[in-house]
Amino acid sequence: MQKLSNSSVAALLSEMASLLELEGGDYFRVRAYQKAAQIIAGLPEEAVSLPQVRLTGIRGIGKGIASHLARIAVSGTFPELEEMRRKVPRGLLELLGVEGIGPRRARLLYDRLGVDSVAKLKEKALAGELRELEGFGPKVEENIKASVASPSAGTTERTLWWEALRLAEALLPRVAELGGEKPAYAGSLRRGRETVGDIDMVCCGRMDGTLIAKFSRLPEVLRVLAAGETRASVVLRSGLQCDLRVVPEASYGAALSYFTGSKEHNVRLRERALKRGLTLSEYGLFRLKDKGRKRPVASRTEEDVYRALGLDYIPPELREAGGEIELAARGALPRLVEMGDIKGDFHNHTSLSDGADSMRDMLAAAGGLGLEWTFLGDHSSSLGVARGLDFKAYEKSRGELVALSAELGVAAARSIEMEVDRNGALEFPAEEIGRVDLVVAAVHSALKREPQRRLLEAMKNPCSDIIAHASGRQLGRRDPAPLDYDELFAAAAASGTAFEINGQPERQDLSDVAARRARDAGVKIALTTDAHSAAQLAYLRQSLTVARRAGLTRKDVLNSLSFGEIREWVRSRRAKAGRLASAKGRDLKSRG
DNA sequence: GCCGTTTTCGGCCCGACTGTTTTCAGTCG
């Protein structure tokens, strides 16, 4: 049976929270469901397959939610949710997606005007009927009209991390030009989430509204949602929402930490503060006795705030309330892999197959990024759409690369993204594949056809050095294949095969959760760009970000090795995998 | 619904902004 993913379980709990909210249920009960949904979405293991005692051991999950999960595991839903679905009119959930409409207004709209869809809402707004409702007025009606008319209305579409990062990095200097000091992005963007819902920015500067007013008038801004003295909330021309918050210089660290979150991480920090007779807000950490909040215990830098709470500095990528606070308290946080540890790339494409740039341009770009070495790759021949290379073409290009490497002063070797066929066999025959510098094994065609078995089969080939984009997912476009990672990683640990974290922004595959499990199973990770142009070698940063979220250190990733060490790693792992394969072969023969 | 060295009841993070108010509710992050 197909297992229920944590994200679909989380969606059910979120829906329950929204329905309760619409029903006017207890706020804290609503919060409890939201919190549980968030926790489960970030769990490294399948929530529905965990025993009850394990579940209730997780903070934020009690008997109630655990029993819902048990029901979900069997029937895909739980009775209380079905009950609420019957009670609350369909379509009210949809209204919650509209800016400026929360549970109260949604309820009022339904009760008084029979509004039960965004379409009907639009109709009533255009007819000018909304302003008649108490607490609505003409302004609210205008705002609703505007938000229903905008292209992103009603959708919960999120933006890929990389795209949001580029937008934010373009905006930061603009904020600085307006007089904002130390502008920085925060929120889920800074935490490196796969996708982000909006861009949060913080800066210091004048808190009289002038900076906010100027920001709201930037040409990049399509629409202003709110603009006060210290905060602006706008929709950018790209469609992405962006919030800017201006804080006093002395509060900068507290504010940065506060707006970086996650929400749950912040709640834990505040609880920790309270236990120490302190209170934490975006303005700083204060003694509870200091009623006027005049003299912060810490506030200037994030490091100060964490230190004052008895914690080591927690890198943003780990701030998801996934046990990082406990580790920080014990001084046991991992030292996350950094850009400086990354010496090269393994998987990319040149103009010899489907890349845009020549081997020379790719190698020069790698050198320009400060890489010590790199593999330059291409598809193997059977992937027709990508004009792949056969062994002869591989050998010829390899000779050219050796010359280029000497000329440009960047150590280099050749990799092939080798097709795994329907039976799990690699494309090149054994006598050829053994002479390929590095083999990145990948499933592209017939993705739905037994991906698990094919990957396991592929790893029996001693030359499967790295497995590419294992799940095959493309964020927002294609769901991940349902893989049993425990089984895959156990096989990979035995054969010494590494898994990549593919840095294409829509792939990010392995995911952070899967990469953590791979590391725990003893599997090495390769950070790769899968670049199809020289510019895309920058995707190393995307791959690195996923690795950091997974809690990986430099020892966990192959990219930190020197070129000589990498070549030796390939040689020795193939030798070991070869011995393993032939031992298994003998074993089968003797039994047969 | 969750949680507990103030533990089985009674709390539950906190502030900004807007619009419609005449002191505040609703929404958002």
Image (cartoon, grey):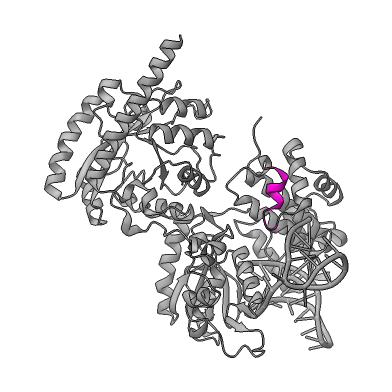
Residue at 45%, 9% (x, y): give it. A592
Q: Is residue A391 left or right of residue A204?
A: left
> Does the segment drawn in magenta span residue A20?
no
In the rendered view, would you say A419 is above or below A316?
A: above
Residue A572 in view of the camera:
yes
In the rendered view, would you say A262 is above or below A296?
A: above
Instruction: Choose between A180 and A370: the one closer to the eye.
Output: A370
Instruction: Choose between A118 and A90: the one closer to the eye.
Output: A90
Instruction: Choose between A288 and A546: the one closer to the eye.
Output: A288
Image-quadrant location for residue A387: top left
Location of residue A272 in the rendering, given as x and y in whole percent from the top left corner: 62, 72
Q: Is residue A43 left or right of residue A543?
A: right
Location of residue A549 in the rendering, given as x and y in whole percent from the top left corner: 48, 55
Residue at 65%, 80% (x, y): give it. A277
Residue at 69%, 49% (x, y): give it. A55
Instruction: Choose between A437 and A24: the one closer to the eye.
Output: A437
Magenta stretch, residue numbers: A51-60
> Does the segment drawn in magenta span residue A58?
yes
In the rendered view, would you say A122 is above or below A211?
A: above
Circle count: 0
Residue A388 in view of the camera:
no
Location of residue A126 in the rendering, given as x and y in whole percent from the top left corner: 74, 62
Q: Is residue A140 left or right of residue A521?
A: right
In the rendered view, would you say A572 is above or below A175?
A: above
Image-quadrant location for residue A243: bottom right
